[in-house]
Amino acid sequence: MHMADALISPLVGGTMWVATAGVAAYSIKKIQNEMDEKKIPLMGVMGAFIFASQMINFSIPGTGSSGHLGGGLILAILLGPYAGFLTIASVLTIQALFFADGGLLALGSNVFNLGFFPCFIAYPLIYKMLMRKGYSTKRIFGAAMLTAIIGLQMGAFGVVLETFFSGKTELPFGTFVLLMQPIHLAIGVVEGLVTTAIVTYIWKSRPEILEKAATGEAIGNISIKKVVTGLVAVAVLTGVVLSWFASSNPDGLEWSMFKTAGKEELKAEDGIHQSLSEIQNKTAFLPGYAFRAPETETEQGAGESEEAWPAVSGGTSTSGLVGGGMTLVLAGLVGSGISLAKRRKNRT
Amino acid sequence: MSNIMNSLYNMRILDDLARKETAIHKIHPLVKLLTTVSYLTVVVSFGKYDIGGLLPLLIYPSMVFALAELPVKPIFMRILLVSPFMIGIGILNPFFDHQIYLLGGKEISRGWITFLSILIKSGLTVTAALLLIATTGMDRLAGALRMLKIPRVFVLQLLLTYRYISVLMEEVARTLRAYSLRAPEQKGVHRSAWGSLAGQLILRTFDRAQRIYEAMCLRGFTGEYHTGGFKEIRVWELAYLAGWVLFFAAARIYNIPMVIGSLITGVIR
């Protein structure tokens, strides 16, 4: 469920980047306060393990298919939520850079969906709670299953929301939810089963690892409230700031408002809203915005076209095709020209 | 099994490419990082129907490929393998958007345009990210992150993860080979071995981390991470960044193919 850059808008990508950076900064502060520096290599190598473990196919009995280990949950259990979150963040960074698995702009969203939900919501609120009375085979099973399923459901819903607000796909919200949630329910069950098996094994052979992870962190007083409040504040702020620069096309959020409220902006005649929007109009360096090419602002199709639609008239469309072709040729020529010149230079 | 080796091989290709010494490779890593980020932002900021405007942005990867003397094939293969998730979502667009669009006298559904736009965008963004790593390498990129004041703990941890991926992948590959020799004709790891196989690997990983930590201590590790420092960003490197950013902005503001096209068709008429 790694999101790609092509499906995300700069506004959503930027907002999620800021939210993720906030959680990461908080986690770093936390582990620096209480950490022995021993944990740095452990985090590094565990990150590499998560990477390598994606190659293990756990065959699912009776189905003929196989599942993988997700990462976020097992890292939270073995390293604690803060170190676990940072480790999953570095795993996702490397996946984005080397394997094009999830984009760089979408990295914030991916870390949030796959790291924040399992480490900071599902782990402390479900796993820790259920494990309060100590480890036992049954409790591990119940806790791991529930945590994996709920963590993944939240992550999947995060993907849906982020994609939806980015407005790049035509998929209706409801259809997308119905596609994503059941798939991730199945994935969550598998992840829960695998996590149960691993945690049970480690608990039986080296219980001190789990105890250390549980006691080494001040999880009892993890200030989830602080994290969430801070996050919401930061996300809202960035959302507002970034939307000054965003496109005026009613896509994503505005579009959904258009659909639900029948108008793109809910008008508030007086008070703070108006003064804010005045400031916004003055400060936005591209008022009415979008770095939109004027020549594409032609036809507004019968009141339902969500976006300025590139000119439809035959003439312009031919110019567009010709120009597009020329641009492609040009791009190709630039590259091959340089290569050729370089080769010639090397020969002489 | 083969896919483990493939991943390892792919990582090493990018590592090797990053060791070249072309003009692009010599550019300050921070400059390349910022150029890439602005490129990505501009690419994804295009509206979902705006395909023509995206085309001039092909010039950036095309030039970097050429200047950095990178082989096209291995990177291209990677782009073809882009997440099926995204294609899966994009391919649904034609089913949900039936508005008709006229292109060169032919009628096509608008859904296909948005699908094409997603495909082009994903091609461009994936290429840009791969080009960044293929011309910079992980170590130098980590240095750039430090210059951006990303905390030491995170950067060190990122580098360690990167460094140990190949070690652990080989370990997993050996383990799986041993398992498959003892459980022939079996797809994947049987349920009875889930805990012991993966759990054993985790325990070994913990022990390995302990050994690594001791080795680091013996070499004077005190929680600090020394990158060795970077040269200052030079003027021509700033010019490189500024030049690209200006070009991206121009491509975003003006529909360049449309301008070229009207010029040509105008001349013909």
Image (spheres, rainbow, N blue to C red):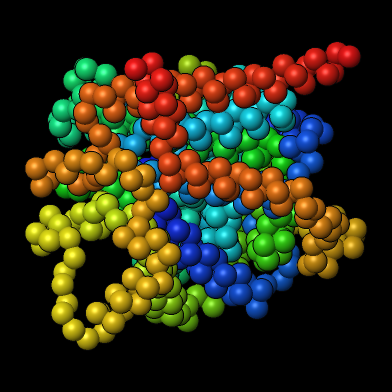
Compared to residue B45, the image places residue B149 above or below, namely: below
Relative image position of residue B264 (x, y in whole percent): 42, 21
Image side of residue A176 versus residue B143, left or right? left
Q: Residue A80 lies in what quarter of the image?
A: bottom right
Look at the image and tell me whether residue B46 can be seen: yes
Look at the image and tell me whether residue A130 can be seen: no
Q: Please count the marks in the image.
A: 0
Image side of residue B160 versus residue A118, left or right? right
Q: Residue A286 lies in what quarter of the image?
A: bottom left
Residue shown at 48% from the left, 25% from the top? A327
- Of residues A216 and A318, the one nearer the viewer is A318
Compared to residue A31, the image places residue A65 above or below, namely: above
Compared to residue A200, the image places residue A271 above or below, namely: below
Residue shown at 63% from the left, 24% from the top? A335
Residue shown at 70% from the left, 49% from the top? B239
Relative image position of residue B181 (x, y in whole percent): 59, 20
